[in-house]
Image: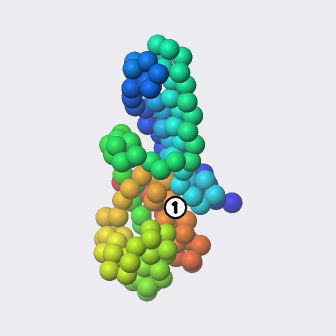
Amino acid sequence: MEQQVFESVRYSAVCQDCGAELKCWGAQALVDGRLRWDVESSCSACGFSLAVCGGDMPAEQRDQMLSEHGPARLQVSSPQARSVSIMRVLRAELGIDLMNAKAVLRRVLDGDHSGTLPEMERLAHALRESGIAAAATRP
């Protein structure tokens, strides 16, 4: 059974009903092998509230999450013998071409490929499913 992994951030926005400060809580989660972004928002001035589930994570909140929690890194064990297999997984999971997969592979092998914990755990899980020992770690 796959472990569920998530990270969250709190941020403010403008209430679409009254223009006051809207308090938001967003969470990126890895659920059943898929990344999801869920947000709950509420306005203390007018009572407006909203929950949006399963959308794409906005770049601003991703940057905030990386700043607050720090980046996770993708680590692979014995990668040299499995470079082609690793690139195959990277291409499938990230939707990238061969040239970009080679660049990402170099960062993975150097220990420099990073992202949010759910993002890196998704890649690690896909690599493990392909028989490659991998983990999402934080330094």
Query: Where is the N terminus found, in terms of image quarters?
Result: bottom right
Classify 29 as above or below 134: above
Please state the horizontal and vertical placement of residue 58, each as a whole percent of the image: 40, 46
Classify 19 as above or below 85: above
Mark 1 Cα within 10 Å, few/some/many (few <14, many 20+)? Answer: many
Q: In the figure, residue 32 lies in which quadrant?
A: bottom right
| Count of all numbered marks drawn on residues in the image | 1
Look at the image and name its color scheme.
rainbow
Residue drawn at (46%, 30%), measured in percent from left and top? 24
Please state the horizontal and vertical placement of residue 55, each as a whole percent of the image: 52, 48
Residue drawn at (44%, 75%), measured in percent from left and top? 91
Q: Nearer the viewer, residue 79 or 62?
A: 62
Q: Is residue 59 visible?
A: yes
Q: In the figure, residue 20 lies in which quadrant?
A: top left
Q: Nearer the viewer, residue 135 or 65?
A: 65
- Amino acid under disc 1: Arg
Query: Where is the C terminus found, in terms of image quarters?
Result: bottom left
Looking at the rendered structure, the secondary structure element under dot 1 is helix
User: Which residue is the site of mark 1?
Assistant: 122
Residue drawn at (56%, 48%), measured in percent from left and top? 54
